[in-house]
Image (spheres, grey):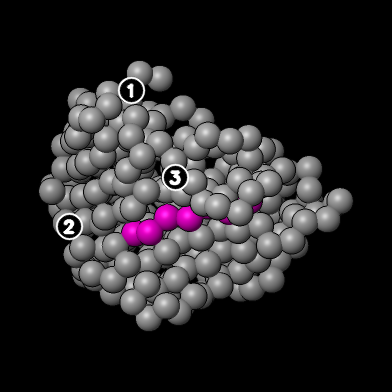
C-alpha cells in the first residue's frame, strides 16, 4: 500500500479508499446488533482508521479515545477491532444508545464459544456482551482486549474499558475460544460510528472524538508497541465526515461526524 509520510490527510467523499482486510462495518456497528431498536434510513455509517504493527502475533490490543463533544441522539459508538489468526474478530468499545460498554466476537464459530458476563448469541456467527456504562465528554477512555489465559486447547480473552480520570476499569466480559483461533494479527482497527435513525446525511448531528496511537503487546513479549497508520475509510455521509491522521506514521487520529 502506498504511504504518504508526514502529510496530514482529511478524508472526504472523493479521498477515501477502503482498507484491505476483513469488512470493517461489523466492528463499528456492535451496538446496533445489541440494541436493534431502530431502522435507520442512513445506515451503516462509520469512519475507521486501519493500522498495522510489526510482529507475528499479539496477546493484547490497546487504544485511548477521548470524546470531544456530547450528542443528544442515542447513536454514537466507539470501538477497537483486532482480528485473530482464524479471521474471527473481537470488538470492545462503548456507546450511548443506551449508555453501555460492549465486548463482542464475530466469526464463523462465534456463537459456540463459552463466556462469562451478560452475553447473548443472536446467530451462530455473533456473540455480544454488554454492561451499562455512561461516558463523559472530555474524559479519556482506554479500550483494551487481552488474552488472560491459554491452554493447549483454549484461549481466554477479556474486554475492558477504563476511565482515565477515575482509573476505574470496567470488565465487560470474557470469552473462551479454541486455541486454534490463534492470537491477534497485525490487522487492527479503531473508529466511530453513528447507527441511529438518520433521515439524511444533512441531518447528521456533530460528534468528535480524538484517538491516541493504537498499540499491541506481542504474544511472546511484555511491552506494548505502537502501530503504523495504513489507511482510513468512511462508509457513508462522506462529505460530512473527517478522518484526520498521517498515513505511514505512528500516530493517532481525529474523527469528526456531521461536520
Question: Secondary structure beneath disc 1?
Answer: loop
Question: Secondary structure beneath disc 2?
Answer: loop
Residue 146 numbered mark, or none: none
Looking at the rendering, which quadrant does residue 87 occupy?
Answer: top right
| Residue carrying label 3 | 226
For the residue pair 226 and 41, the one nearer the viewer reads as 226
| Residue 73 picture location, percent across and down | 25, 66
Nearer to us of marks 3 and 2 is: 3
Nearer to us of marks 1 and 2 is: 1
The residue shown at (49%, 75%) is 169
| C-alpha gap between disc 1 and disc 2 | 32 Å
Q: Earlier in the sequence, mark 3 or mark 1?
A: 1
User: Where's the N terminus, which quadrant?
Assistant: top left
The residue shown at (32%, 67%) is 140
Is residue 195 found inside the magenta-colored segment of the image? no
The residue shown at (31%, 31%) is 247
Q: Earlier in the sequence, mark 1 or mark 2?
A: 1
Q: Earlier in the sequence, mark 3 or mark 2?
A: 2
Residue 3 numbered mark, or none: 1
Residue 205 numbered mark, or none: 2
For the residue pair 129 and 166, the one nearer the viewer reads as 166
Is 62 on the left or on the right of 109, as rendered? left
Amino acid at each position: 500500500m502506498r504511504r504518504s509520510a508526514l502529510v496530514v490527510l482529511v478524508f472526504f467523499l472523493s479521498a477515501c479508499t477502503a482498507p484491505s482486510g476483513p469488512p470493517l462495518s461489523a466492528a463499528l456497528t456492535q451496538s446496533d446488533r445489541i440494541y436493534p431498536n431502530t431502522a435507520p434510513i442512513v445506515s451503516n455509517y462509520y469512519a475507521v482508521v486501519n493500522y498495522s504493527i510489526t510482529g507475528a502475533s499479539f496477546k493484547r490490543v490497546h487504544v485511548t479515545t477521548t470524546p470531544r463533544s456530547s450528542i443528544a441522539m442515542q447513536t454514537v459508538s466507539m470501538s477497537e477491532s483486532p482480528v485473530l489468526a482464524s479471521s474471527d474478530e473481537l470488538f470492545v468499545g462503548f456507546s450511548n444508545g443506551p449508555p453501555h460498554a460492549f465486548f463482542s466476537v464475530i466469526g464463523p464459530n462465534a456463537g459456540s464459544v463459552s463466556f462469562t458476563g451478560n452475553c447473548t448469541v443472536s446467530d451462530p456467527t455473533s456473540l455480544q456482551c454488554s454492561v451499562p456504562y455512561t461516558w463523559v465528554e472530555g474524559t479519556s477512555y482506554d479500550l483494551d482486549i487481552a488474552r488472560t489465559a491459554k491452554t493447549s486447547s483454549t484461549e481466554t480473552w477479556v474486554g475492558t474499558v477504563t476511565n482515565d480520570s477515575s482509573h476505574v476499569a470496567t470488565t465487560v466480559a470474557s470469552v473462551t475460544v479454541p486455541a486454534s483461533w490463534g492470537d491477534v494479527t497485525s490487522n487492527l482497527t479503531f473508529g466511530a460510528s453513528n447507527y441511529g435513525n438518520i433521515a439524511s446525511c444533512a441531518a447528521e448531528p456533530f460528534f468528535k472524538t480524538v484517538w491516541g496511537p493504537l498499540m499491541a503487546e506481542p504474544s511472546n513479549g511484555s511491552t506494548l508497541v505502537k502501530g503504523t497508520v495504513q489507511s482510513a475509510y468512511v462508509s457513508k455521509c462522506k462529505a460530512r465526515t473527517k478522518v484526520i491522521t498521517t498515513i505511514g506514521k505512528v500516530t493517532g487520529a481525529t474523527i469528526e461526524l456531521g461536520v
